[in-house]
Amino acid sequence: MLSMDPVERAEREREMIRRHQGLGLIPENATVEDILGLSVQDIMERRLQTVVFRRGMAKSLFQARQLITHGHIAVDGRKVKAPSYMVTREDESNLDYAESSPLNARDHPLRQDLSPMDMRGGQQVE
């Protein structure tokens, strides 16, 4: 990118920043240097498997992976069976159990063992 025309380079940098912001990897006021500073850990935190576990929808990363591959997790109402799916900021608010999954029922035994979490905001509920 350094050898590009300055106008084209600036346009490509803006697009790259927007794409990484959409994935939730960098903050709103980030620069290209922030992208260069990303670590593998930053990227792993945006995987569906990790987000499901962090939101309290599974007891472990292994269980989160099982729930995903068995079709129990939906993003925006659509089943996602790939634990490596990159969750965008927009997707994060639309993450829930799949409509057809038995886990969709709040009284399911697996959900009873989890800490009570509000699935939309990650806040503890009473």
Image (spheres, rainbow, N blue to C red):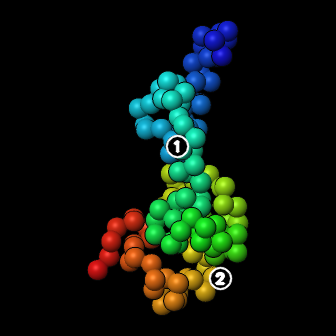
Q: Which tag, 1 or 2, sits closer to the chain's start?
A: 1
Which residue of the protein is positioned furthest toward the left in this rendering? 126
Residue at x-position 66% and y-position 60%: 83
Residue 18 lies in quadrant: top right
- In the rendered image, residue 21, in percent from the top left (x then y), is placed at 51, 40
- In the rendered image, residue 106, in percent from the top left (x then y), is placed at 48, 86
Position of 68 with respect to 88 (left or right) is: right
Q: What residue does disc 1 label?
A: 42
Residue at x-position 61% and y-position 67%: 62
For label 2, count other residues whose C-alpha is less than 10 Å away and answer few (under 14), some (14-19) or many (20+). Answer: few
- In the rendered image, residue 117, in percent from the top left (x then y), is placed at 39, 73
Would you say residue 5 is visible in this rendering? Answer: yes
Indicate the secondary structure of the residue bearing disc 1: helix
Residue at x-position 66% and y-position 55%: 84
Position of 3 with respect to 54 (left or right) is: right
Identify whether 57 is placed above or below 18: below
Q: Amino acid at mark 1?
A: Asp
Would you say residue 74 is visible in this rendering? Answer: no
What distance separates the C-alpha of mark 1 from that of mark 2? 32 Å
Foreground pick, 23 / 108: 108
The C terminus: image quadrant: bottom left
Indicate the secondary structure of the residue bearing disc 2: loop
Q: Nearer the viewer, mark 1 or mark 2?
A: 1
- In the rendered image, residue 111, in percent from the top left (x then y), is placed at 49, 82
Mark 1 and 2 residues: CB-CB less than 8 Å, in contact? Answer: no
Q: What residue does disc 2 label?
A: 100
Q: Amino acid at mark 2?
A: Ser
Position of 72 with respect to 31 (left or right) is: right
Residue at x-position 52% and y-position 43%: 42
Foreground pick, 73 / 54: 54
